[in-house]
Each structure stands twice: as structure tokens, then as C-alpha cells.
Image (cartoon, rainbow, N blue to C red):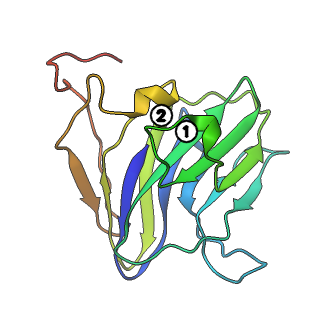
Amino acid sequence: KFRMKRSPGAEWSGASSLDFNTERILFGVPGAANPASGQREFAIHVLNSPGFDGHSYSGITPTTNENVMLVAKIDFTGDLLSLWREPDLSQSENSQPPIATRAYTSASPSTAIRFGSGGSGSTAWDDVVVATSWSGLTRNGAFPAADSFTMNPGGKAAVQVLKNDLGNSDP
């Protein structure tokens, strides 16, 4: 789960799942426009995964300066990638359909998450949560509350979590 706020000029932005140093999946707004609409949309983009590469577009275009919450899911058991936009986290996962899904049977692991964007505008990131269940996305447990960062075009950041609000780190 993450919040993303795209400034004017941001062309692509999203959170990527990496297989060690190889980017495999981008959840957010990929650089390629939807061929059906001609617009950049919220989507799932699978790349560097022979046999699985491609896009699953949502039909929803991002709004400049909108602080949007996205929830991305890699379901290795169900062989499915899912993306939600502004879901109600107090409701069950099954009660709200994702805006995009994509079959994904690759055996590539997810070893890291990278936040990135391109274009002439910056993208701000906030409320980043990595969880193993839908209930783990809410603020009911250990959760950093006041962390955010903005990346300017071409910028790089490394984030190391040293402790959470309960004072411990639970990788």
C-alpha cells in the first residue's frame, strides 16, 4: 500500500517489485499509454519476465496533484497480480474489486520494492506499508505514522526502516 501524489509533468510513476536487481512488476502509472484510450492510466506493467510481459490497464487516468492510495498485491499462490485505487481498508478484500488484474505464474521472487517516476515533475510518496494480508494494511499494529518522501526527476533514494511506532523492527 502506498500514497502517490504526481506533480505536473510526471509521466510515469509507481512502485516496482524487484527480483534482486531486476525490475519485474510496476504498479502505478506506467510510461506507455493505453492503446485503447491513448491515455496514461493506472495499471500493472510486467516487464523483464519473458512470457509474462505486458500491461493491464484500469481505464482510470491519474489526476495531477491527487494524493491517491494504491494497494498492489502479488498473489504467488493464486498466480494473480491485483491493483486497487482508494479501497476501503476497513472492508474485506473480496468486497471490492481491483481496478486491474493480470495473471502471473512466474517463479521470480519479490526481494525489494522500488519507488520511481519519470518526466519533468516530481512524485511524492507516503503511507508505505508492506504486508502479507489485507488486514495488515490498516493502522491496527506497528506502523510508521509520519514518514514520507518526494523524489524529483532522476532522483534516487534508499529507505532503511530502523524502527516502527512500537519501537522495534519486524522485518
Residue 18: give its label: 1
Q: Residue at the spot x=57%, y=31% of the render?
A: 110
Taking the image as shown, residue 100 lies to the left or right of residue 22, namely: right
From this view, report whether residue 42 is shown above or below residue 18. below
Q: The N terminus lies in which quarter of the figure?
A: top left
Tell me if residue 75 can be seen. Answer: yes
Please name the amino acid that badge 1 sits on: Leu
Q: Residue at the spot x=31%, y=16% of the render?
A: 170
Mark 2 Cα shell of 10 Å, populated few (<14), some (14-19), many (≥20): few
Looking at the picture, tell me which residue is in the foreground, 12 or 76: 76
Q: Residue at the spot x=45%, y=27% of the render?
A: 135
From this view, report whether residue 126 is shown above or below residue 5. above
Element on which disc 1 rests: strand
Q: Whole-percent x and y of residue 46? A: 69, 50
Q: Residue at the spot x=19%, y=39% of the render?
A: 145
Residue 113: give its label: none
Residue 30, quarter of picture: bottom right
Residue 144, quarter of picture: top left
Taking the image as shown, residue 91 lies to the left or right of residue 26, namely: left
Q: Whole-percent x and y of residue 138? A: 36, 33
Mark 1 Cα shell of 10 Å, populated few (<14), some (14-19), many (≥20): some
Residue at the spot of label 2: 112
Looking at the picture, tell me which residue is in the foreground, 86 or 154: 86
* Earlier residue among tags 1 and 2: 1
Element on which disc 2 rests: strand
Tell me if residue 130 can be seen. Answer: no
Please name the amino acid that badge 2 sits on: Ala
Is the residue under label 2 in contact with that under label 1 (CB below 8 Å)? yes
Q: Disc 1 to disc 2, how far (Cα)?
A: 5 Å
Q: Whole-percent x and y of residue 150? A: 26, 60
Q: The C terminus lies in which quarter of the figure?
A: top left
From this view, report whether residue 112 is shown above or below residue 141. below
